[in-house]
Amino acid sequence: MRLDHVRRLSGPNVYLSRPVAIAHLDLQGLTGHETTDHPGFAERLVEALPGLATHHCAAGRPGGLLDAMARGTYFGHVTEHVALELSGLIGREAFFGRTVLAGAPGRYDVVLECPRDEPPGSPVVERLVGVALRMVTGALAGPPPDPAAELAEIAALHEAERLGVSTAALAAAARRRGVPVHRVGDLNLLRLGYGRYRRTIWAAMTDATSAIGMEIAGDKRLAHRLLADAGLPVPDGRVASSPAQALEALRDIGGPVVVKPVAGHQGEGVHIELTEPPEVVAAFTAAAGGARPGPAAGTAANGEAGGARPGPAAGTAANGEAGGAEVIVESYVPGRDYRVLVVGGRVAAAAELTAARVVGDGAATVAELVERINADPARGEGHDRPLTRLALGPAELDLLARQGHRPGTVPAAGEAVWLRRNANLSTGGTSRDVTAEVHPEAAALCVRAAGTVGMDVCGIDLRLPDIAAPLPAEPGAAGILEVNAAPGLRMHLAPHEGEGRDVAGEIIDLLYPAGTPSRVPIVSVTGTNGKTTTVRMIAHMLELDGRRTGMTSTEGVYVGRRLVHRSDASGPRSAEMVLGDRTVEAAVLETARGGIVRRGLGYHGADVAVVTNVTPDHLGMDDTESLDDLVEIKALVAEEVRRGGRVVLNAEDPASAGLAERPAVRDRDPSVRLFALSPDAPVLVAHLRDGGAGYCVEHGWLTEATGDRRTRVLPVEEIAGAFGGHAGHVVANALAAVAAARALGVSLDVVGRALRTFEPHTRNPGRGCVYRVGENPVLVDYAHNPAAVAAMGAFAAARWGGPDGGPDGGSGVAVVTLPGDRCDDLVVETARTLAASFGRVVVYEDEDLRGRRSGEMTRLIVRGLREGRPDVRHHPAGDLKGALASALDMAEPGEPVLLLYEKLQPVLELLETLGAEPEE
């Protein structure tokens, strides 16, 4: 077997509302083979991976996979389950899998769930599938290879790229509150909310965290000065830049003292309770080595630094020069260590901290006790787990020696042997929740400290005899040691002792207080035809309603009617672009098939979903072989509407109307709004009879209907771009747009005004636009499938004459090119449909052949034209310019010329050179 490639669908997709990866496998020599063709295979594989015996498979119960292998199943399916099992073994939460045939025999897509915030570029899933393939193929003839070594590498990679504990808790808290969450790359940087409600959070730093406050918190010297000026208790301290100055500070302050870097973090370089000059000199040397400018932004951002500070070292920016290495020598405050988390001017949680230690049992050595504690799965490296693994480095060995121990000594039963004096979690310490015990005086002290430094979220490190008691009056009996920006949340989320606190929720509530929205209204529009026009109409309505609107379409990304990114912007990346813009008040997203298939949706939960129609197109692409396949893809837009949202469907298109009955749509309990050109459309009539809402054309008016009630919106003849109602497809698009806009509360007056002013050449370029070139109207459109071409033919016949209006029994001359990536049958059918309306056709090929050979598309189009009309007159042309010139020469005065194109800009430039004038 061979792994060809892996692609990731990061947004909601046709398989799951969560991310998936799709591994494309070629079974090669195992094509057609089943597990029963290889005796002993299943037994050998399960012996190597016993967890496979618990897999449910389609049976919905443990043992389902074993039954499937006993009956006989294909090896792509087995690979799926092995990959999921390996994923679980490295602690990666992924439970969903599916294996589907991918076109040719022996080719399968293995769909595997991915953790929600796994980086899009993560190599983990590809490596897991690679290990799975080697184990499956290895088990065919003997024991599969032992995956332990490679799994250890993959597990380390997974640990390194997963969100830190604090950031993961913040993401989870936001999602519980319905706030959209998007991780930026592999950082611990989260974008929350949509549009104008977008907020950003980097670990426990918010986008409202004061940069000045961060600088102050990172400079212990400056922070102490400001706290002392505010009358808050801080240790008596001095700044020393040499051993001599450190000793002078010891003499001035009197022992015991603490020596620490000016800009240190996570307890690095902190030396506690020193009394002797040699100790102070050694501590100065060690602390000065860590007194370089503070951590880069990535340190705090990545996480869970518990006081790491982004940006330049404190003092560097403020003082304008780097200076030499400096340390703080300050008085030692006796008592217990506490960390108090202040969020938005109130105490959110408090924990008592205990430094890293082991407790003897009279038999195990210090090293063995450390190893025993580190076996706790809650302990990990860095900040990725609730607790940090204990170490036996130089600082720990030094402290052990001061207590008369070495790694190999055996402490007495019950003897506490300290590995660290500082009580940081990052150096192996533990926490006990004391939130409920905090005395009001201690709480007020911490809140004042946070306010003095100017922090919205911070951790206050302080020492007190007892946080549950009133503050002691004696000088030096209590002290604020530090104010930590970007505080780690681990000690509060999952304390070693006591109740965990939802501090992540407190921070999210600070960003989004009760009643504050986190998302702007989203309209998602899909369908085979009419998407772009409908999107543009809806966006125009919302703009006239006073909402700054972000819009995506095949022509680009627009914000407030300004083009901000030119591209075919109908996929998830463009949706994310709009929803990430903090000026956007409403979003209208064209959501095309290709983006759904290749990357999933770029949003979670639309307020309104519109499906204009589903007719054959793109068949043969991305394993889409039938209309039913298209329905499955486009149905996702209706299925991913918010609970209680609105779904707008075409009552005259069976595929669109049928989406209302899909279980996944019904599960969202949406309000369904139907539209139809005819008020007598059976599906619409039944819907209205049941009290539903709908939109139709009745007595020449766009009409809003609810049950038996009718409200006129606008005369059809007043719709700009509908040419007096002759362009029926434009009228249908208008109905869909009205339904969506009304679902968002846009008034009928605004809706009517928007449709009257929806001038096609400026607001809907390239879609049903008519120009006058000499004596002939030129109808420009992007029609490229049978339904769209039929609509153009009907428009031309209605606008410029009946089917016998031209000299060859057609409504003018057609200039046609079609996309080369469509399957042969669809190209032929589209040309056949074109011939039903046009007896004279000029055929040209676009510069981008999309993988076709030169002349191949012309031959297919001509074949379809002849099948549709044997007497059709068709002429080849070398390019767009020659094609239009030939068509204009063939057309009688006043006859229309239909111009179908692939790229709009060359068409507009050509029309300008011909002196074309817009026509309404």
Image: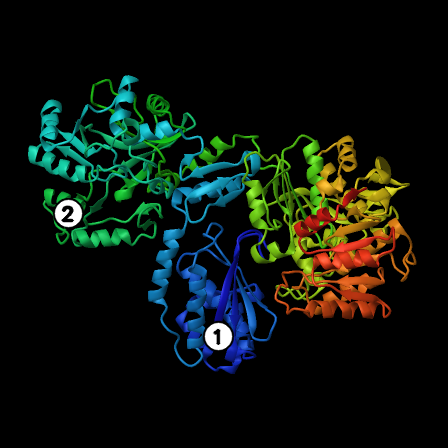
Place of residue 493 in the rendered image (x, y in percent of width and height, measured from the top left): 39, 40
Q: Residue at x 45, y 52 (%)?
A: 119
Which label's residue is closer to the chain start, 1 or 2? 1
Q: Is residue 588 above or below residue 368?
A: above
Name the quarter where the C terminus is drawn: top right
The foreground one among 854 and 44 is 854
Dot in front, 1 or 2: 1
Please tell me in which quadrant of the rendered image residue 231 appears.
Answer: top left
> x%, y% of residue 879?
69, 60
The amino acid type, in three-letter code, at marker 2 is Leu
Q: Which mark is residue 513?
A: none
- For residue 821, side relative to residue 384 (left or right): right
Which numbered tag is attached to residue 1? Answer: 1
Tag of residue 397: 2
Q: Position of residue 750 (x, y in %)?
A: 75, 32
What crowding class fits label 1: few (fewer than 14 Cα within 10 Å), some (14-19), or many (20 or more)?
some
Q: Residues within 10 Å of mark 2 (few under 14, many from 20)?
A: some
Find the distance from the CA under tag 1 to the CA under tag 2: 52 Å
Q: Is 767 placed left or right of 499 in the picture? A: right
Along the viewing direction, whichever of 621 and 505 lies nearer the viewer: 621
Element under disc 1? loop
Residue name at image x 81 percent, y 44 percent: 722
Q: Is residue 289 left or right of residue 469?
A: left
Q: Are marks 1 and 2 in contact (CB under 8 Å)?
A: no
Q: Secondary structure at mark 2?
A: helix
Tell me, yes or no, if residue 666 can be seen here. Answer: no
